[in-house]
Amino acid sequence: MKTIILAEKVLMNGAWQHNQVLSIEKGVIVDIAPLSYFKKDATSVINERIRGAVIPGYIDTQVNGGGGAMFNHTPTIESINAMAEAHLKYGTTTLFPTLITDDIDTIEQAADAVSEAIAQAHPSVEGVHFEGPHLSVEKKGVHLPRYIRALSDRELATYTRRDIGQVLITVAPENVPCDIIRDLVGQGVIVALGHSNAPFETVQNALDAGASGFTHLYNAMSPLTSREPGMVGAALLNNSVCGIIVDHHHIHPKAVELAYKVKGPHQLMLVTDAMAHVGASDDTIAFFDTHITRQGNKLTTPDGTLAGSCLDMHGAVTNSINDINIALEHASTMASATPARFTKIHDRVGELEVGKRANFLVINNDNTLLEVWQNGSKRLCAN
């Protein structure tokens, strides 16, 4: 049975189209056409009329937790469900559960949980992000140094599993040789660089070996200086995709503006780096052998270290619009089409096109999130 929706304003391929009729069948868009082309008959009845702007659902490649669940603590399908439900309310229709640095048993348990989600055709899950443990101790952030280590055969076997969707890993190039990066990329793994103190040349060699992205630009990476461009310099100079956390705690707005002017919306993607606090009422939540506390919209450990974020994707979009002066059309691209292309899932999500899933959001003139649709069904949103 088809669902037919008339939308007054739809963002398609980066441009606004007005009075569009979307036909949806089995959760997939099967037709988009102007109202003037719509032929109404007994089997073609408009089921719903949407006032407001329709944009693609958000895709978040870095989600550590949500709904009170932290993936590292309980790497199970139940945690994935809680995380997905929490972030869906803020417009994230696709996400990559993210496991930060941990022991090999936890890595394997996380992979099993993602495999279960993929086998069940989970509507939000397209793969997994392993952020560590092959990082730099000097740029560890809140990652525990006792777990940071070289990549072993057992980990390699996990990263190259064929039952866990698209795999994204973050590595420090000074600790992972280029031949391993080349091998991972050859087996379909997306390699991003981050949590690194590497000099420019080491980063460039990793990019030449097939690494194609950077994890949370500026944060936990060697900076751009006059005599050493560092990882930040390599990220800005190369045609690679950079994740960026626009919560105004991780990065100064002018640093975001600079990155946007250099990279543009097709090479800069919004991420949340969200912890369990998103969609949860508790302000203090356990984190390994310590805890993370929310004060306002900032997360820290007891020693004051910034510990991920309580940012949601719609917040990242509206921060980009309101504080960086990025147009809605481009902020939407940074939250949907760009991460879809980066993670190679753009054949099915990321834009409103025939043949892709009916994942979309409805916002008003103030960019307030009004509705969330996933696979052609209206879901609850945070508002």
Image (spheres, grey):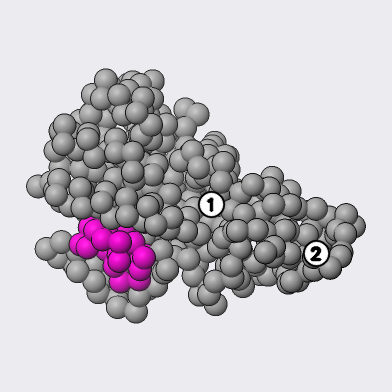
Q: For residue 6, what is the image quadrant?
A: bottom right
- The residue that appears at 65% across and 66% down in the rendered structure is 362
Q: Give whichever of 314, 76 is nearer the camera.
A: 76
Q: Which of 129/154 is in front?
A: 154
In percent of width and height, residue 184 lies at 31, 29
Q: Amino acid at mark 1?
A: Ala
| Residue 186 colored in magenta in the image | no
Residue 117 visible from this viewpoint: yes
Q: Residue farthest to the left? A: 146
| Magenta stretch bounds | 61-83
Would you name the residue on which mark 1 appears? 335
Residue 312 is situated, as x and y percent measured from the top left of the image, at 45, 63
Q: Which mark is residue 366?
A: none
Marks 1/2: CA distance?
Answer: 33 Å
Residue at x 37% of width, y 52% of height: 119
- Give amino acid for label 2: Ser
Q: Report which residue position mark 2 lands on.
A: 44
Q: Is residue 100 left or right of residue 351?
A: left
Q: Place residue 360 in its image quadrant.
A: bottom right
Of pointers 1 and 2, the one earlier in the residue sequence? 2
User: 203 or 358, which is in the foreground?
Assistant: 358
